[in-house]
Amino acid sequence: MDTGTASNFLKMHDIKPSHHRIRVFQYLVERRNHPTVDVMFRDLVVEIPTLSKTTLYNTLNLFVEKGIVSLITIDENESRYDADTSLHGHLQCSNCGEVYDIGLRFSSIDFADLDKFQVEESHIYFRGICPRCLNEGDSHK
Amino acid sequence: MDTGTASNFLKMHDIKPSHHRIRVFQYLVERRNHPTVDVMFRDLVVEIPTLSKTTLYNTLNLFVEKGIVSLITIDENESRYDADTSLHGHLQCSNCGEVYDIGLRFSSIDFADLDKFQVEESHIYFRGICPRCLNEGDSHK
DNA sequence: AACAAAAATGTAAGGATTACAAGTTAATTA
DNA sequence: TAATTAACTTGTAATCCTTACATTTTTGTT
C-alpha cells in the first residue's frame, strides 16, 4: 500500500497521518504477519531509527480504538495485531508459535444465546499443529 | 460437588487430590463465574487462610495442563478460568466486565481452512453489552 | 513415630504494558 | 517567514500479572 493511500485511509478514520503512523499501518497491511509489538519494533526500527516502543504502543492502541486494526489475544503474554478486520479466525501452532489466518463461514452458526446481547466484536481462536510442523514430525519417524 | 466426587475426579485425571486442589476445583465447578486469579484468591483465602497466590497459580496451571479446566484469555491483562471444558463461547460485557457463557452449535460451521491443521483447542470470544447493562441504559433515557 | 516424596509458601524476579513529563515536530495565524 | 499552539514522539520509571526458586509444611507409607 503506497503512502498516499495509507494516509487517506488514516484520515478517513479520524487519525492524523503522521509519518510513524503511516509506516506502522503499511507494515501491518503488507506483511500480514500478526506481529507482536517486539517483532514490529525490531523490524521497523531499522528504517525508523528514532522509533520508540511507547510510540508503537500508542499507535497500535489508537488503531484498535478507531477500528482499523484488530487486537489478537491468542498469546497469553503478548498482544498481536492484524490489519485485516474482516471476520476470520486465527490458529497458533503450539509447536512453532506461528499464527495463521483461518477463513470462516459465519452465516451457518447458531448463536441463539447472543440474542439478548449487543455484540461488538467476535474472535475465533484455535491452537494446534500447523502443516509444516506436522510434516517435520513425520520425517523424524 | 462434594469433596469425595471432586477428589475422585482429580485422581481420574492424574492429579493428586490435596485439600487445596479439591477446594479450588470445587470453587470453579460451583460458581461458574469465570474468575480471575485475584477474585478466586479473595474468595478462597477466607476459608483457607494459609492459601498463597503462588499455590493458586500452580494449581490452575496444573488443571489447565491436565485438561480439566480451560483458560479464558478474553481479558487482555488477566487470565480467567472455567471448569466447563465443553465447547462453548464467552462474551465479556464491555460496560460491566462480566463474562457470560454463550452456547454454540459448532457442527454447522465451515472450517475449510482447518483441513491441514491438527486442531487441539477452539476458543470463541465476543465483546459487547449484556442485557442488564442495555436495560440500565434505557432507563436513563 | 520416622521417613521420603510431594505440595504449599513467601519473596524476589521477570516481562509486557502504561503513566508521565519533557522534547520535538507539524500546523496555523499573523 | 516568524511566532504560536497543538499534537505527536520519546525515554524513564512505575505498574501489574505471572513465574522462579529455595524453604517449610504437609502427606502418605513403612
Image (cartoon, coloured by chain):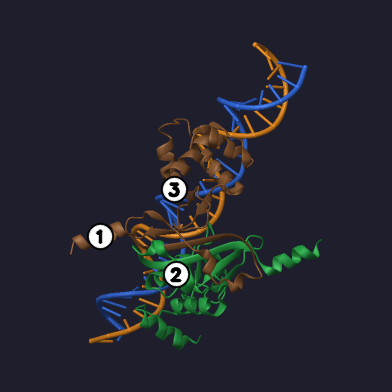
Chain colours: A brown, B green, C blue, D orange
Mark 3 residue element: loop
Q: Residues within 10 Å of mark 3 (few under 14, many from 20)?
A: some
- Mark 1 or 2: in front is 1
The numbered dot on residue B60 is: 2
Answer yes or no: is residue B139 visible. Answer: yes
Image coordinates of residue A62 in percent, x first then y, are: 58, 44
Mark 1 residue element: helix
Residue bearing mark 3:
A36
Q: How many numbered circles does the render carry?
A: 3
Q: Quadrant of residue D21?
A: bottom left
Q: Chain of mark 1?
A: A
Q: Label 3 is placed on what type of residue?
A: Thr
Q: Chain of mark 3?
A: A
B6, A134: nearer the viewer: A134
Give the Cα separation between the discs numbered 3 and 1: 26 Å
Residue bearing mark 1:
A135
Q: Quadrant of residue C19?
A: top right
Q: Chain of mark 2?
A: B
Q: Are marks 3 and 2 on the same chain?
A: no
Is A95 placed above or below A50 here? below
Q: Residues within 10 Å of mark 1 (few under 14, many from 20)?
A: few
Q: Label 2 is placed on what type of residue?
A: Leu
- Mark 3 or 2: in front is 3
Labels 3 and 2 touching (C-beta < 8 A): no
Give the Cα separation between the discs numbered 1 and 2: 33 Å
The numbered dot on residue A22 is: none
Image coordinates of residue B89 in percent, x first then y, are: 53, 69
Answer yes or no: is residue A127 visible. Answer: no
Image coordinates of residue B9 in percent, x first then y, are: 41, 83
Give the Cα separation between the discs numbered 3 and 2: 26 Å
- Residue at 45%, 76% (x, y): give it: B20
